[in-house]
Structure formats: C-alpha cells, structure tokens
Image: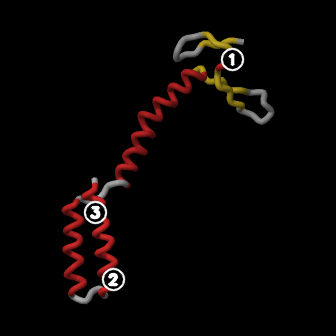
C-alpha cells in the first residue's frame, strides 16, 4: 500500500509514514500525512525555531554574572556594615572572601 506525502509530494510505502493506533483493539489507525523524513525535518525546524531559542534564553538568564563595578559596589556596601557591628568579624571575612572570588571571576572573563 502506498501513500503520497503532502509535504514533499513523493509517493512512498505506507511503512514510511508514522502510524498511531487510535483504539486499543488496533482496528482504527491514524496515518500521518507527512512521511518520516519530512516529519523529522519539521520537528528539527520546530526545535530550532522555538525550543532551542527558549533554552538559550533561559541559559543566558541563569548565567548572567555581575559586572566588575557591581562586585566592587557590593564590597563597598558590605564593609561599612561590618565596621558598624552588623556582622561579626568572622562573618565579614566569609562575605569578603566570597566577594573577592566574584571579583576574581569577573576580572578573569
């Protein structure tokens, strides 16, 4: 049995089309209009157009780093708090260590 793909227009064997059973007894089938090759191409184009762009945007959002200026401003904001006894000396040193690592990472980029 053969069928014509509506996308590429080629006449192909029915085995080259995706078949989905509609009922549990297996009597009624839905045979896709696109052949497997055209279906793969369509799915890949859809992925590139929508899903990949969305994933890249989410990845960029997650990977946004603070700039050097922001890191230094943060360091300057934390230092007076430690001097005003808002932090213990140990807490301030831990925060400063983290901030210095951020600054080093930003400078390395």
Q: CA distance from mark 2 to mark 3?
A: 20 Å
Query: Tag 1, which secondary structure?
Result: helix
Q: CA distance from mark 2 to mark 1?
A: 70 Å
- The residue shown at (78%, 30%) is 26
Query: Tag 2, which secondary structure?
Result: helix
Tell me which corner region of the image, top left, top right, bottom left or bottom right, holds residue 102: bottom left
**Mark in front: 2 vs 1:** 2
Q: Residue 52 location in percent, x, y?
A: 43, 39
Q: CA distance from mark 1 to mark 3?
A: 62 Å
Q: Residue 80 location in percent, x, y?
A: 19, 81
Q: Who is closer to the viewer here, 108 or 48?
A: 108
| Quadrant location, the N terminus | top right
**Mark in front: 2 vs 3:** 3
Q: Who is closer to the viewer here, 11 or 107?
A: 107
The residue to which callout 1 is attached is 14
- The residue shown at (55%, 16%) is 6
The residue to which callout 3 is attached is 104
- The residue shown at (39%, 44%) is 56
**Which of the two discs, 2 and 1, labels the residue nearer the N terminus?**
1
Query: Tag 3, which secondary structure?
Result: helix
Q: Residue furthest right?
A: 25
The residue to which callout 2 is attached is 91
């Amino acid at each position: 049995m053969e069928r014509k793909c509506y996308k590429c227009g080629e006449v192909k064997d029915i085995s080259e089309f995706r078949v989905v059973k509609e009922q549990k007894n297996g009597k009624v089938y839905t045979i896709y209009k696109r052949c497997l090759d055209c279906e793969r191409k369509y799915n890949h184009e859809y992925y590139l157009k929508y899903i990949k762009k969305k994933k890249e945007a989410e990845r960029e959002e997650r990977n946004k780093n603070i700039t050097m200026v922001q890191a230094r401003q943060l360091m300057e904001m934390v230092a007076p708090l430690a001097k005003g006894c808002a932090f213990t000396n140990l807490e301030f040193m831990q925060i400063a260590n983290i901030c210095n690592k951020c600054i080093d990472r930003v400078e390395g980029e």
